Amino acid sequence: MESAKKLVEAKVDGRDQIKLESLDSQDGKNKVSFIGCFEFTQLVKNYRATFGNDVYKWPVPTGTSHAEIVIREFVLKLKGTWDYPYKDDEICHCRHVKTKTVDQAIVNGAHTHELASRWTGCSTACGTCKPDVEKIIKYRVG
């Protein structure tokens, strides 16, 4: 019988990443890999020590550090409840700012619209994208 693979991943480009490759096989074992900064790797290790290796049973983190935000995305994706609030590739059409650029800035600490604008250039022309940027901030950090 051939194994079906399911990949669930959350990451900050060039910084932190956690990935589950679920092998739908007789033994039902899952392989979780992670790499990143000290804070991120320690948080993943703490989750494993506290909640076990079954990542499907991990609780959703509620903090606002980049590590907690990335793990929250991972856990929500595992639970099938990840519903990112903005679907287009480009969020700021005036400045041609990609949604991913704004999202990565938010994960890395731009937790206000003003910081997201300063770090990425979004919403610095017409401001039409401001509500969407604020939705992403609210979704990511609450």
Image (cartoon, helix red, strand yellow):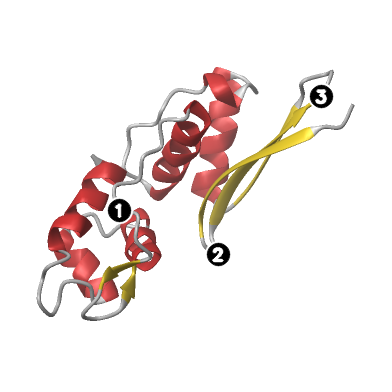
Judged from the image, the secondary structure of the residue bearing numbered disc 3 is loop
User: The residue under label 2 is which amino acid type?
Assistant: Gly
Q: Residues within 10 Å of mark 3 (few under 14, many from 20)?
A: few
The quadrant in which residue 117 appears is bottom left
Q: Position of residue 134 (x, y in %)?
A: 17, 54
User: The residue under label 1 is which amino acid type?
Assistant: Tyr
The residue located at (48%, 36%) in the rendering is 77
Number of dots carrying numbers: 3
Residue matched to label 3: 25
User: The residue under label 3 is which amino acid type?
Assistant: Ser
**Residue 14 numbered tag:** 2
Judged from the image, the secondary structure of the residue bearing numbered disc 2 is loop
Q: CA distance from mark 2 to mark 1?
A: 22 Å
Q: CA distance from mark 1 to mark 3?
A: 35 Å
Q: Residues within 10 Å of mark 2 (few under 14, many from 20)?
A: few
Q: Position of residue 107 (x, y in %)?
A: 36, 54
Residue matched to label 1: 86
Quadrant for the N terminus in the image: top right
Q: Check if mark 3's residue and mark 2's residue have beta carbons within 8 Å.
A: no
Q: Is residue 12 above or below residue 19?
A: below
Q: Disc 2 vs disc 1: which is toward the camera?
A: 1
